[in-house]
Image (cartoon, rainbow, N blue to C red):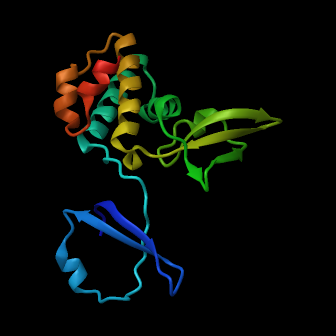
Amino acid sequence: MECKAYIKELSRDIRTNGLNLLVTLEDADLRYFEKVTFDTALRLRLTKWSEKRSLNANAYFHVLVGKIADEIKAPKPYVKNILIGRYGQMEMIEGQPVFFKTNLPDSVMLNREDIHCMPTKREDKATYYKVYRGTHTYTQDEMKILIDGTVDEAKDLGIETATPDELKEMIGAWNYEKHIAEE
């Protein structure tokens, strides 16, 4: 189960020295808790809440990738990797960016759909690539950055893009009006 939670109280258990955490769960399914009893061990992962990106936003990104690819006569995977490399989010493991080294040429690496990467350094016959996350993992804020950059690139090529109102409707909960006001 995943849901939005708000911390209401935090205290230390004087017997075990562990922390007691009282939270309010938003839109939680009570049936989940009927299956567990007190002192049942649960795996708990706490992260700062962020809205997930809209599936419409992801679909729109792919539409723009297709239009840009057609305009510049390049393969769609290549265009997608270039845009993700410019405006996307790096893959991180334990707070460190992920890189790999290969002898495969850019023409192969940048046309792959199973990994998003950009060349960073060439050494002898090998190239180091920086790895980027797939868009399906993006939050709304991360998707906003990717779409904004992609829209700018499309406009530079004379490609018609959605209006701010259409983007607002498409992306839904993503606060596009605030973004426009900040520009």
- Which residue is the extreme one toward the front? 14
Q: Quadrant of the C terminus?
A: top left
| Quarter of the image where one finds residue 93 | bottom right
Snapshot quadrant of residue 30: bottom left
Which residue is depicted at the point 40% across and 31% down? 145
17 relative to 140 in the view: left or right? right
Residue 78 image position (x, y, % from top left): 49, 32
Q: Say if residue 182 shows up in the picture.
A: yes
Q: Which quadrant holds residue 167?
A: top left
Is 101 located above or below residue 86 in the figure? below
Residue 140 versus residue 117: which sits nearer the camera? 140
Relative side of 21 to 29, left or right: right
Quadrant, the N terminus: bottom left
50 over 73 or under it: above or below: below
Residue at the location (27% across, 26% down)?
178
Q: Position of residue 175 (x, y in %)?
A: 25, 33
Instruction: Please determine whether, in this image, residue 113 is positioned above or below residue 41.
Output: above
Left or right, 34 with reference to 76: left
User: Viewer-proximal residue, 10 or 59?
Assistant: 10
x then y, percent, for residue 4: 29, 58
Residue name at image x 43 percent, y 18 percent: 72
